[in-house]
């Protein structure tokens, strides 16, 4: 069995993990103007601003704050999310930033837990604050890594497991949260992959300090 097939065979059924489905996300987006704001996430900005511009996929892009920022830098970006409302809004925002930037953006409604990603098709796979049950999480990380060309990167940022007891807000089910060591060992098992960063980082919010996991992986 291939590595991808083995990871995809991981079974989340019966785990009773309570996740928001696409309808729940649609309702959340329909209820607010801009849920995550229009600036890129601070860690995405810090990790990506020095990378050579290329082709990127933003997996679970929401309203596209990170994808739009990357496109402004010159990246060719596909933003994917299973909320059609979020993707529609991302398209509207892109149209507002001008034709040149908008022409670098493609939006797609799809489920990142199952969608196929073409091998070695991108220079950057971005996974920003998507919280999935363990099997889906591992499968997404593996497919993201294999989608990256040699020299390219996977950047993952999301709520850290330590945030439950030491930080503020974010999902409250431990099984959906990230652990730098877990991701380090997962990526270390993927051939031609080097983990450059795998750590817990602090994000200062109006409600206090939130703890996030930040991982940067390079394909070699
Ligand atoms: C917390 S938001 C983060 C959005 C964006 N990445 C950002 O950083 O602004 C989580 C997003 O993940 C999307 N999402 C969750 N599970 C998904 C799945 N299986 N497939 C596609 N999108 C998913 C939701 O619709 C939502 O837009």
Image: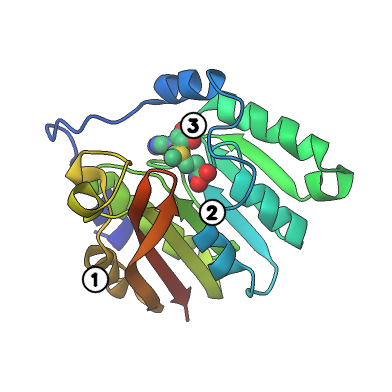
Q: Residues within 10 Å of mark 1 (few under 14, many from 20)?
A: few
Would you say the beta carbon of the disc 3 residue lies within 8 angstroms of ligand 1?
Answer: yes
Residue 34 x %, y %: 60, 31
Circle 1 sits on which residue?
A: 185
Spatial separation of the CA atoms under disc 1 and disc 2: 25 Å
Callout 1: SS = helix
Callout 3: SS = loop
Count of marks overlaid on the render: 3
Please tell me which of labels 3 and 2 falls first in the chain: 2
Circle 3 sits on which residue?
A: 82
Against 216, residue 136 (above or below) is above
Mark 3 near mark 2, Cβ–Cβ under 8 Å?
A: no
**38 lies left or right of 215:** right
Q: In percent of the image, x 24 and y 71: which residue is there?
A: 185
Circle 2 sits on which residue?
A: 41
Q: Is residue 30 visible?
A: yes
Please tell me which of labels 1 and 3 falls first in the chain: 3
Q: Nearer the viewer, mark 1 or mark 2?
A: 2
Q: Residues within 10 Å of mark 2 (few under 14, many from 20)?
A: some
């Amino acid at each position: 069995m291939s590595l991808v097939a083995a990871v995809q065979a991981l079974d989340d059924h019966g785990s009773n993990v309570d996740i928001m489905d696409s309808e729940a996300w649609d309702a959340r987006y329909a209820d607010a103007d801009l849920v995550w704001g229009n600036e890129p996430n601070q860690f995405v900005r810090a990790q990506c601003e020095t990378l050579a511009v290329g082709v990127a996929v933003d997996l679970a892009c929401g309203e596209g704050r990170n994808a739009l920022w990357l496109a402004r830098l010159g990246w060719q970006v596909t933003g994917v999310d299973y909320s059609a409302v979020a993707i529609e809004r991302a398209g509207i925002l892109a149209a507002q930033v001008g034709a040149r930037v908008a022409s670098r953006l493609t939006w797609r409604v799809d489920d990142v837990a199952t969608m196929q990603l073409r091998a070695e098709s991108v220079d950057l796979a971005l996974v920003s604050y998507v919280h999935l049950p363990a099997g889906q999480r591992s499968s997404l990380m593996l497919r993201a890594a294999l989608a990256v060309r040699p020299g390219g990167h996977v950047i993952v940022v999301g709520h850290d497991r330590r945030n439950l007891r030491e930080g503020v807000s974010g999902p409250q089910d431990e099984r959906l949260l990230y652990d730098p060591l877990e991701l380090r060992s997962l990526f270390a098992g993927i051939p031609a992959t080097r983990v450059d960063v795998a750590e817990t980082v602090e994000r200062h919010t109006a409600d206090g300090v939130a703890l996030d996991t930040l991982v940067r992986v390079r394909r070699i």
